[in-house]
């Protein structure tokens, strides 16, 4: 668990997008990421507008949007600029490098055109990251080192391999999807499966509260989906989660901060 502040860690981050993210985090005092898991562009854009002021990153799954067009990404980028957040397409790339390159740039999503952050499994080896790192000038990469779901195969040796691979691609990779802090302070740790009320769902998701994830397990960014998305007042829920996540970060630094 790192007690260095985000200010202290900012210059340690090699990837440009990672540093930009920390600037936003510090400015907005928000280490909250909302997972906008909805199926229409209208819902996606209205969530981005509603929770935008409270978040540092909006996480998307473009492939669950039933009416995706380039215009959706254009409007999303507009809202990201307006509310000052980054866009993270949670595509979880996992194929050989050549296919990943096509998936990143082609299809109907053109992810490389609008995503600030993408992520990848390490199962296929470094070629996956190599393909993503070619766009690293304007895109940062996160590696999946652990998962929140029950029965995940990310055993400690696997998590270690993710760390080793990240170090080889530090210009592109600036952090991990993990359950907490798993390595050095020059990487950032993003944790999904965060909820203030629930303990899980019927399909193996396992939830932890923001305080445990950030103050105890040492994660940096909390990714919250249904905890906010299913709330009747998303603005208020986002504000509650933002405060809980930021307080947990301050708690980790020590109360004298
Ligand atoms: N996600 C996880 N666990 C992981 C990796 N990614 O839940 O290990 C993603 C899911 C979803 C979000 O794809 O978009 O984080 C969690 O949503 P929830 O808060 O509604 O469960």
Image: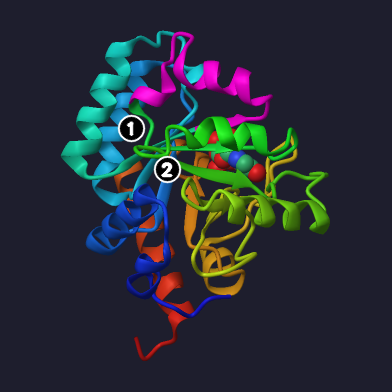
> Which disc is residue 47 wearing?
1
User: In this view, which residue lies farthest toward the bottom?
Assistant: 256
Q: At x 19% / y 37%, what residue is drawn?
A: 81
* Residue count near mark 1 (Cα–Cα under 10 Å), binned few <14, some 14–19, many ≥20: many
* Residue count near mark 2 (Cα–Cα under 10 Å), binned few <14, some 14–19, many ≥20: many
Out of 171 and 39, give the one closest to the viewer: 171
Which of marks 1 and 2 precedes in the sequence?
2
Can the viewer see residue 61?
Answer: yes
Residue 118's spot in the image, x, y percent?
49, 36
Residue 71's spot in the image, x, y percent?
27, 13
Q: Are marks 2 and 1 in contact (CB under 8 Å)?
A: yes
Residue 7's spot in the image, x, y percent?
32, 72
Q: Secondary structure at mark 1?
A: helix
Out of 250 and 208, give the one closest to the viewer: 250
Q: At x 43% / y 63%, what residue is drawn?
A: 245
Q: At x 33% / y 49%, what residue is drawn?
A: 55
Could you give the CA–CA distance between mark 2 and mark 1, rounded to whole angstroms? 9 Å
Magenta residues, as a range?
90-113
> Which disc is residue 216 wearing?
none
Q: Quadrant of ligand 1?
A: top right
Query: Is 100 a magenta residue?
Result: yes
Query: Is 65 a magenta residue?
Result: no
Is residue 6 left or right of 197 when viewed as pictured? left
Q: Is residue 257 above or below residue 59?
A: below
Q: Is residue 99 above or below residue 57?
A: above
Q: Is residue 222 above or below residue 232?
A: below
**Image quadrant assignment for residue 256:** bottom left
Residue at image mark 2: 34
Q: Secondary structure at mark 2?
A: strand
Out of 18 and 71, give the one closest to the viewer: 18
Q: Is residue 61 above or below residue 157?
A: above
């Amino acid at each position: 668990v790192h007690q260095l502040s985000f200010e202290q860690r900012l210059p340690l981050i090699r990837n440009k997008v990672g540093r930009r993210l920390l600037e936003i985090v510090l400015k907005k005092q928000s280490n909250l990421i909302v997972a906008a898991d909805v199926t229409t562009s209208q819902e996606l854009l209205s969530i981005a507008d509603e929770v935008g002021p409270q978040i540092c990153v909006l996480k998307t799954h473009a492939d669950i949007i039933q009416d995706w067009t380039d215009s959706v990404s254009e409007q999303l980028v507009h809202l990201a600029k307006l509310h000052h957040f980054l866009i993270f397409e949670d595509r979880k790339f996992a194929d050989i490098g050549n296919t990943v390159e096509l998936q990143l740039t082609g299809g109907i999503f053109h992810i490389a055109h609008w995503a600030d952050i993408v992520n990848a499994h390490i199962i296929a080896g470094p070629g996956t990251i190599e393909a993503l790192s070619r766009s690293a000038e304007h895109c940062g990469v996160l590696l999946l080192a652990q998962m929140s779901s029950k029965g995940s195969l990310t055993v400690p040796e696997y998590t270690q391999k993710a760390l080793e691979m990240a170090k080889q691609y530090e210009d592109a990779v600036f952090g991990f999807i993990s359950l907490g802090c798993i390595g050095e302070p020059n990487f950032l740790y993003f944790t999904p499966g965060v909820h203030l009320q629930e303990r899980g769902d019927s399909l193996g998701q396992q939830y932890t509260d923001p305080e445990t994830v950030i103050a105890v397990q040492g994660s940096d960014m909390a990714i919250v989906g249904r905890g906010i998305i299913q709330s009747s007042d998303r603005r208020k829920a986002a504000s509650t989660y933002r405060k809980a996540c930021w307080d947990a970060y301050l708690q980790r630094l020590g109360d004298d901060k």
